Amino acid sequence: MIEVRDIHYARLGTRDLDAAERYATDIIGLQKVERSSDRLYLKSDSRHHTLAYFLGDPAEQVIAFELKDWSTLGAAHEQLRAADVPCGMGSEAEAADRHVEAFMWFLDPTGNRIELVARPHEAGRRYFPTRDAGILGFGHVGLCSTDPVRDQAFWLSNFNTLVSDWIGPCPLLRVNARHHQMALFAAKRKGIQHINHQVAEIDDIMRAWYFLNEKKIRIVFGPGRHPTSGGNFLYFEGPDGMIFEYSNSDRTIIGDLSAYKPRQFPLHPTSFCMWGSKPDIAEFKE
Ligand SMILES: CC(C)C(=O)/C=C/C(C(=O)O)=C(/O)C(=O)O
Ligand SMILES: [Fe+2]
C-alpha cells in the first residue's frame, strides 16, 4: 500500500505563458514565485509552488501527491512496476524542475500522469498575492476518468485512498482528514477536469463572483453549495479551457477514519448544488 499525505501540485502545459501568468496572478490570486522563458511557478500557501505552467501542449497535465514517508519512494515504484502500471523514476534534473528532492511518475488506468514526490521544497516565505482572493491553499482536483469504477478500484487497492462520498459512480476520494483531495469524474478524455483552491469564507466566494463578472470571466457553475463536502463554491474558466474552482469546504472526517460510511448521492443536479445552481460543464451534465 502506497501512503500519500496530500495532493501537492498540478502542472499544466500552455502555449502562452504570459496569458497564464496574467490570469493566475490577476484573476485567480496566486503568487508568482518564479518565471523563465518556459516555466511559471505559482504558490498558494507555504510550499514552493502548488501550480506550475510549462511551455508545451495544454493536453499535458499532471498532478502530484506527496508521499507520507519519503523513504518509501523506491518501494512505491517497485509496487506499481510489479503491478504492470506504466511508471518510472524521475531524473535529478526533472526533480529540480519540480522543486522536490525526488519523485516518480505513473499512469492511472485512464492514462492520467500522476507523480509521487518526496521531500518537496518549502518556500521559506509566506504566500503574499497581489490580489486578495481569500485563498488558503490548493484544495483538490477533479480528474477525468474513462471508467470511474475501474479507476476507483485502482486507487483503493494501491493507495491509502478512502471514499468520502459518491455522486453516481464518481467517487470523491480522500487521503487525509479533509473531505477530498481528488474526485474522479466520468469523461471521454483523460486530464484534469478542474483545479480547486480553498478560500476562507463564503464572502470570498461572493466577492469573487462580482469580481469575475466584472472582468468578464466565464462562470461555469455557482455560486452554490455542494451537499457532499458542504462547501460553498464558484467554478470559472481559465487559460486553455481549464476550469478553476474556489470553495470553502471545511468538512473533515476525523476519529476512526475507517468507521466513516461514504454516502451515495444520485447523479442529479440536486447532488451537485443544494441551492439550485446548474453547471455549464460537460462532465457535470447528467
Ligand atoms: C459538481 C460536482 C459533481 C460536485 O458536486 C462536486 C463536489 C465537490 C465537493 O463536494 O466539494 C467538489 O468540489 C468536487 O468534487 O470537486
Ligand atoms: Fe471541486
Image (cartoon, rainbow, N blue to C red):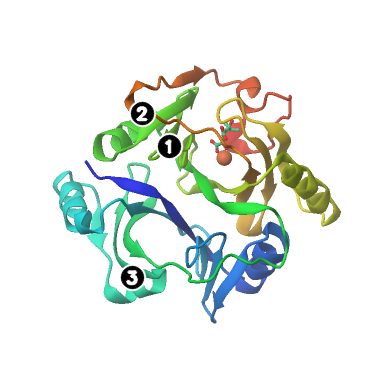
- The residue lying at 69 percent from left, 47 percent from top is 236
Q: Is residue 42 left or right of residue 85?
A: right
Q: Nearer the viewer, residue 68 or 263?
A: 68
**In the rendered structure, which disc, 3 or 1, sits on the residue that comes first in sequence?**
3
Q: Amino acid at mark 3?
A: Ala
> At numbered mark 3, what does the secondary structure look like: helix, strand or loop?
helix
Q: Residue at x 68, y 63 (%)?
A: 23
Q: Which residue is mark 1?
A: 177
Q: Element at badge 2?
A: helix
The spot of residue 153 in percent (x, y) is 31, 31
Q: Nearer the viewer, residue 173 or 20?
A: 173
Q: Which secondary structure, mark 1?
A: loop
* Residues at discs 2 and 3 in contact (Cβ within 8 Å): no
203 vs 230: above or below = below
Q: Which mark is residue 95?
A: 3
- Residue 138 is tagged as none
Q: Which residue is mark 2?
A: 257
Distance between the Cα atoms at labels 1 and 2?
Answer: 8 Å
Q: Residue at x 56, y 27 (%)?
A: 228
Q: Badge 3 local density, few (<14 within 10 Å), some, or many (20+)?
A: some
Extreme front residue here? 255
Q: Residues within 10 Å of mark 2 (few under 14, many from 20)?
A: few
Looking at the image, which is closer to me, 165 or 87?
165
Distance from mark 2 CB to nearest ligand 1 atom below 8 Å: no
